[in-house]
Amino acid sequence: MPHQAEAPLQIPIRRFDSALSIDFRALSDLKVQNIEKIDLSSDGGNSSLDLNLTDVLNFSGLTNQLTIEGASGDTVDLHASSNGATGSWSLAGNAAGFDTFEFSNGSVLATVIIDENITTSVF
């Protein structure tokens, strides 16, 4: 039986070209899916994102991980409120210019890797 090469791993990226303010918690869970990375670095202004565990899980599909790139002036607010899950966000580490935040309730449920130039708040 001939060997079939697997398709290369694709990481869906959503890049924003203008400043924005989005509270993903207010959007239907079905509106935003299959995003592994959000790029705010060329948005031309100061963008802000609000998200919670449910958003990260919906965005990322099977990986439960989201990466956010950006610049000074951008903000990300990570909210503990979620659809039924209890737990909290905490800073788990910093490497290669990115802060790693994990949502945990005794075990890690999701990870958000955020450019250290972005101001990040945990609620």
Image: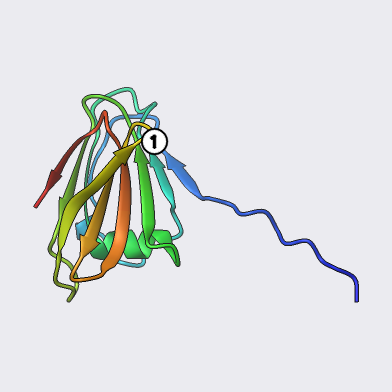
Tally the numbered discs.
1
**Position of residue 24 measured from the top left corner of the image (x, y, whole percent):** 25, 54
Viewer-proximal residue among 42 and 96: 96
Is 101 located above or below residue 42 in the figure? below
Q: Which residue is located at x 30 percent, y 26 percent?
A: 71
Is 45 located above or below residue 33 in the figure? above
Q: Determine if residue 75 is in view.
A: yes
Locate residue 58: give its quadrant: bottom left
Describe residue 112's horizontal placement relative to residue 103 as left or right: right
Q: Which secondary structure, mark 1?
A: loop
Residue farthest left in this picture: 123
Viewer-proximal residue among 9 and 16: 9
Is 15 located above or below residue 59 in the figure? above
Q: Which residue is located at x 91 percent, y 77 percent?
A: 1
Viewer-proximal residue among 81 and 25: 81
**Position of residue 84 measured from the top left corner of the image (x, y, whole percent):** 17, 76
Read off the residue under disc 1.
Answer: 16
**Position of residue 100 measured from the top left corner of the image (x, y, whole percent):** 29, 46
Q: Determine if residue 99 is in view.
A: no
Is 10 located above or below residue 53 in the figure? above
Q: Which residue is located at x 59 percent, y 52 percent?
A: 10
Colour scheme employed for the rendering of this structure: rainbow
Mark 1: which amino acid?
Phe
**Position of residue 73 measured from the top left corner of the image (x, y, whole percent):** 21, 26
Tell me the crowding category of disc 1: few under 14, some 14 to 19, or many 20 or more residues within 10 angstroms, Cα based: some
